[in-house]
Image: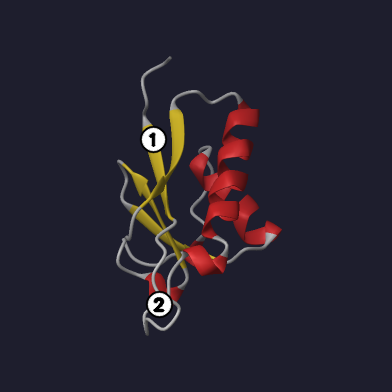
Amino acid sequence: MSKIHKHVFVCVNERDLDNPKGCCFTKDSLEIMTKLKRITKKSGREEIRVNKSGCLGSCEKGVACVIYPEGTWYTIPNNDKAINEIANHILGGEKASNYSMRE
């Protein structure tokens, strides 16, 4: 296994349905994380790791994602356009500014 240079965390936290903050899990976060992981693996970029995480503190805004070490935060909708733009950034392209949460 090669050294990891970039680590992507996608929140898959699950809260009670009546929680006012909501949760990433009910917004298909596990599916989004799996898609990002498959794209990264298919690219052959072994120095990039995509993992699920617990709560990243922004569930009310949508599926939360953070990329380290750069510290880029995204809110990811479950659609191919958004996932592909964020995957492109993960693989070394430009930041996907339409989905940026904070930096």
Foreground residue among 3 and 28 = 28
Q: Position of residue 98 (x, y in %)?
A: 53, 67
Q: Residue at x 40, y 60 (%)?
A: 13
What residue is pinned by disc 1? 6
Q: Is residue 44 above or below residue 65?
A: above
Q: Is residue 60 above or below residue 99?
A: below
- Judged from the image, the secondary structure of the residue bearing numbered disc 2 is helix
Seen in the image, is 79 located left or right of residue 57? right
Seen in the image, is 86 located left or right of residue 80? left
What residue is pinned by disc 2? 60
Q: Residue at x 54, y 53 (%)?
A: 30
Q: Nearer the viewer, mark 1 or mark 2?
A: 2
* Callout 1 crowding tier (Cα within 10 Å): few <14, some 14–19, many ≥20: some
Q: Are marks 1 and 2 in contact (CB under 8 Å)?
A: no
The amino acid beneath tag 1 is Lys
Number of on-image labels: 2
Q: Is residue 77 above or below residue 18?
A: above
Quarter of the image that includes the N terminus: top left
The amino acid beneath tag 2 is Glu
- Judged from the image, the secondary structure of the residue bearing numbered disc 1 is strand
Quarter of the image that includes the C terminus: bottom left
Q: Earlier in the sequence, mark 1 or mark 2?
A: 1
Q: Residue at x 31, y 50 (%)?
A: 71
Q: Which mark is residue 57?
A: none
Q: Distance between the Cα atoms at labels 1 and 2?
A: 26 Å
Q: Position of residue 3 (x, y in %)?
A: 36, 19
Q: Is residue 90 above or below residue 21?
A: above
Seen in the image, is 98 located left or right of residue 68? right
